[in-house]
Amino acid sequence: MVDEYLDGLRLAREVSEIEVKTIKSSIARLHGLLSFPFTALQLLADISDEDVADVFVRINSKGESLDQADFILTM
């Protein structure tokens, strides 16, 4: 897949060895996102603001700290 991309790019323009290494590294990092653990919590549309705030506080107390802007986005 990466080699096919590079072949197509080489048809359009000259590609340096540094660019090849950078492209291969970047695509490998991007592919690594497929194994990144991601959790989404879906709440019911009719949940109260108080319940949303409670969920926010519980999640905020575990792991990465969230700020007021994050809370506003949950509302």
Image: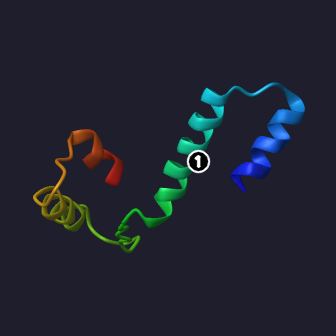
Q: Which of the 4 image quarters holds residue 48? A: bottom left
Q: Is residue 73 left or right of residue 49?
A: right
Total numbered labels placed on residues in the image: 1
Q: Residue furthest right?
A: 11
Q: Residue at x 72, y 57 (%)?
A: 1
Q: Residues within 10 Å of mark 1 (few under 14, many from 20)?
A: few
The one nearer the camera, 71 or 10, is: 10
**Which percent across, then down, holds residue 31?**
54, 57
Secondary element at tag 1: helix
- What residue is pinned by disc 1? 27
The one nearer the camera, 65 or 57, is: 65
- Let me know if residue 40 appears in the view: yes
Q: Residue at x 19, y 59 (%)?
A: 53
Q: Amino acid at mark 1?
A: Ile
Q: Is residue 54 left or right of residue 48?
A: left
**Which percent across, then down, holds residue 44?**
38, 74
Here the colouring is rainbow
Q: Which of the 4 image quarters holds residue 21? A: top right
- Let me know if residue 75 appears in the view: no
Q: Is residue 36 left or right of residue 66?
A: right
The one nearer the camera, 51 or 9, is: 9
Q: Residue at x 16, y 47 (%)?
A: 65
Q: Residue at x 36, y 66 (%)?
A: 37
**Which percent across, then down, holds residue 61?**
10, 58
Q: Is residue 41 above or below residue 16?
A: below
Q: Residue furthest left?
A: 61
Q: Residue furthest front?
A: 17
**Which percent across, then down, holds residue 2?**
69, 51
